Image (cartoon, rainbow, N blue to C red):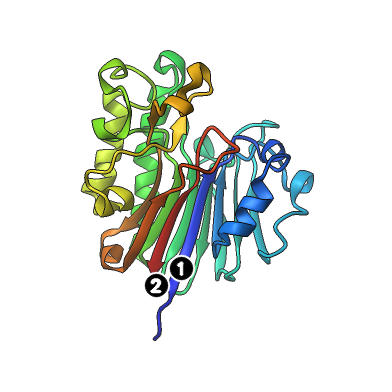
Amino acid sequence: MATKNLRILSWNVNGIRAIIKKEFLTIIKTEDPDILCLQETKAHQDQVDKILDDFPYHHWNTAKKKGYSGTAIFSKVKPLSITYDMGIEEHDQEGRVICLEFDHYYLITVYTPNAQHELARLPYRVRWDKEFLDYMKRLEKKKPVIFCGDLNVAHQEIDLARPADNHDSPGFSDEERQGFTNIVNAGFIDTFRYLHPENVQYTWWSYRTNARARNVGWRIDYFIVSNNLKNKLVKGKILKDVYGSDHCPIELVINI
């Protein structure tokens, strides 16, 4: 069966109602991905869904708390099935997971919970990491998995500008980094690091202290794939010059 290059974009938009007042729609039209995965939409579908008409398939998962969290996928490819959340009540209140099933793979967008100030939510985050990985492995028994999104962790010291100052910070604690290591040890590939072993780039910059202009950032947004897809990877790119959010988009091109 013939394969083709599939181009996927993932972006934590930090509020879709805010970003569409900027250049968001123009950016997406210019980039023209086959599938667009969004995190931290902070909105319900009926508030903003009359957008992105080039994508016939719109899928939203919203938090029960208004204006918080949330994910969305816009696709030009019709999925076989759509699943929202993981089926675990503790984790299914904040609209953090959407899974689309296609012929040869699953595609998941995920907005991983932040451990929060002084690591107040770290115990919950540790449970999430374990149970999300279990969920990925269950899917993988049926088909290869591609998942993307804001995972709220910089895995290695190369993935943030100031590692020495942040070992006890949310997003770089030992426990969160171990959670990511567990993903790798379970047979998944961090596509950007696989394709660019020594490349120092970031995907998120604090709005404070002019961090983006000084490039004091973190790489916390990822495309992760099942190991048996690694030879199908064509390109992984961080679109660092695209503005509108405190995150920039990331891109994966895969032959599938």
Q: Residues within 10 Å of mark 1 (few under 14, many from 20)?
A: some
Q: Which residue is mark 2?
A: 256
Which of these two is toward me, 126 or 103?
Answer: 103
Q: Quadrant of residue 251?
A: bottom left
- Quadrant (top left/top right/bottom left/bottom right) for the N terminus: bottom left
Q: Amino acid at mark 2?
A: Ile
Quadrant hosting residue 254: bottom left
CA separation in Å, label 1 and label 2: 7 Å
Left or right of residue 127: residue 84: right
* Rendered view: 179 above or below 175: below
Residue 153 place in picture, x, y as percent: 37, 33
At which x and y percent is residue 155? Answer: 29, 35
| Residue depicted at x 54% and y 61% | 33
CB within 8 Å, label 1 to label 2: yes
Q: Secondary structure at mark 2?
A: loop
Secondary element under disc 1, as helix, strand or loop, is: strand
Amino acid residing under circle 1? Leu
In the image, taking residue 171 as reference, residue 84 lies left or right, namely right
User: Can I make out residue 188 in this image?
Assistant: no
Decide which of tag 1 and tag 2 comes sooner along the chain.
Answer: 1
The residue shown at (27%, 47%) is 193
Whether residue 76 appears in this view of the structure is yes
132 shown above or below 256: above
The x and y percentages for residue 60 are 64, 50
Image coords of residue 99 (percent x, y): 51, 56
Q: Residue under label 1, please give it.
A: 6
Q: From the viewer's perspective, tell me whether residue 8 is left or right of residue 64.
A: left
